[in-house]
Image (cartoon, rainbow, N blue to C red):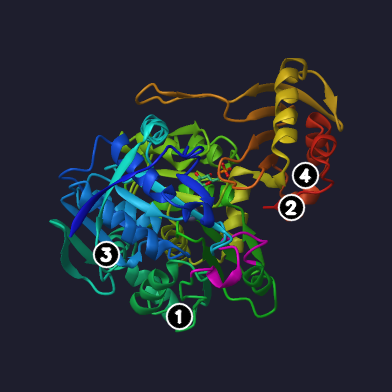
Amino acid sequence: MERLTIETRPIEGQKPGTSGLRKKTRTFMEPHYLENFVAAIFQGIGGAKDKTFVLGGDGRYFNDRAAQVILRMAAAAGAQRVIVGRDALLSTPAASNLIRTRKTDGGIILSASHNPGGPDEDFGVKFNTPNGGPAPEEVTNRIFEASKRIETYTIVETTDVDLSAPGMTTLGGMEIEVVDPVEDYAALMETLFDFDKIRGLFAGGFTMRYDAMHAVTGPYAAEILETRLGAPEGTVVNAEPKPDFGGGHPDPNPIWAKDLLDLIMSGSAPDFGAASDGDGDRNMILGRGVYVTPSDSLAVLAANAHLAPGYSGGLKGVARSMPTSRAVDRVAEKLGIDCYETPTGWKFFGNLLDAGRATLCGEESAGTGSDHVREKDGLWAVLLWLNILAESGQSVAEVMHAHWTAFGRNFYSRHDYEAVDADAATRMMDALRDRLDELPGQSVAGRTVESADEFSYRDPVDGSTASGQGLRVNLKGGGRIVYRLSGTGTVGATLRVYIEDEGADPSTFDMDTQEALADMIAAADEIAGIKTYTGRDVPDVRT
Ligand code: G6P
Ligand code: ZN
């Protein structure tokens, strides 16, 4: 086996975003593109020599090829061992778990999360640190710097490693351990939740549909829900991971999981519905006739987590990303625990979880998780919901109404304007930023602006800071509008507008969210000039 040193040149734009480096798959397939970035990761973490890594991905197109390249580069760089999921598959939370429990030096996750897959779609590579979480900015900056200086990389020349069955093998002196992707993760779930109780729920005729969206969680959900918890066969649909996710967007929201939403709103709805995304870290929660927003889900989980064995001792604290609704803040206040507000990106929760300041974290972007791993975890959220339903004996609708009655309701919606001209989006944000100081006291769409600022964050654990994290406008009476440009898009810019209003009157709880927010939605456009700058009349996605 020959170890080759390949000459290369820096490739522009290898700057990891909100969650790793995401590009068009064809970009990753260009000569040296993947190799340069992997070499930059190794350099950015001080080399791969004698290190142990976890490797796996969501099974999208190019996952298998990329995994082989990374194994060959890890071998050439002198890594001691790579623990890789069978067929190079690992959900993101399962990878995080392995990185932690096997005490490794980190892991490489191949995924573009909820973005579609295929030769003309998206691919991504992300490095997670030994705590199991996405690399913090200090590390991704080093990786980016390394990518700008690269002149050569090393790789061994060999045939493909057989990853089709668990077992040990070697590659140029490096050990490769192929593991069942589900086993350790399922075992972890059994320690957190009352499987007997949930089994009893299913045995009693409780019905559920879990849509794996042809993404990585199919095998996980089938094993846990059907095999271990006794849900009837067929509870998990679209369970087979496919390189193109069956042609869909593996994004569990009302647009892309419309079949499931239609079913849950129909006369033949099951009691409970759920879906997760490409790499298994996002979730969508539904109950007969009810869509639970991710922000509400976080609040409900925080209020009821003590019903599951893994959280029976209570929560140390909670954390949410800034644009996430403040429903969870109300729960934290009542429980007398801390509530942290972080920038968008799961990596910002890492320090709070490591330091034991927060137990539960969540984001409006369909991410919820806890200190059991250092990623958000779709199936975990589903199991915590199931545990709560089993323990309380309530339906999802009953849980939601009880929650709103106790805490009030935060009406919340995110409006996305996708593939907007990047310059126009930047101009809009710049213009708004310049006017933030003038906004307080102004009246817009019948509401008065109370305060406005740009969010920046100082990590309470290590003191690191992040600025430019979204423009916030607070309105009198509790409403809030947040403007942000997405850090995960691959084409143009995605403008996200997060709209929230508080309601305490129970007679409004069943109102349609868009209706309840109509004046705020008008105010959002009036304040920023969305139509004028983007030329768009309506958002592409409303969550
Ligand atoms: C990924 C990250 C999340 C983030 C989401 C949306 O899923 O893991 O932490 O909330 O992307 O990010 P964006 O920058 O596109 O709003
Ligand atoms: Zn994801």
Q: Amino acid at mark 2?
A: Asp
Circle number at residue 540: 2
Q: Counting other residues with Cα less than 10 Å from the Cα at mark 4, is it few (<14), some (14-19), or many (20 or more)?
A: many
Q: Amino acid at mark 4?
A: Leu
Q: Is residue 244 a member of the stretch shown in magenta?
A: yes
Q: Counting other residues with Cα less than 10 Å from the Cα at mark 3, is it few (<14), some (14-19), or many (20 or more)?
A: few
Q: Is residue 430 left or right of residue 330?
A: right
Q: Secondary structure at mark 1?
A: loop
Q: How far, Cα to Cα, is label 3 from label 2?
A: 40 Å
Q: Earlier in the sequence, mark 4 or mark 1?
A: 1
Circle number at residue 517: 4
Q: Secondary structure at mark 4?
A: loop
Q: Residue at x 39, y 70 (%)?
A: 198
Instruction: Where is residue 300? Give x, y as percent.
Output: 52, 51
Q: How far, Cα to Cα, is label 3 from label 4?
A: 43 Å
Instruction: Judge whether residue 480 can be spotted in this image.
Output: no
- Range covered by the magenta-colored residues: 243-257
> Quadrant of the image for the N terminus?
bottom left
Residue mark closest to the camera, 4 vs 2:
2
Q: How far, Cα to Cα, is label 4 from label 2?
A: 17 Å
- Write down the residue under mark 3: 187
Circle number at residue 204: 1
Instruction: Where is residue 415? Give x, y as percent.
Output: 71, 46
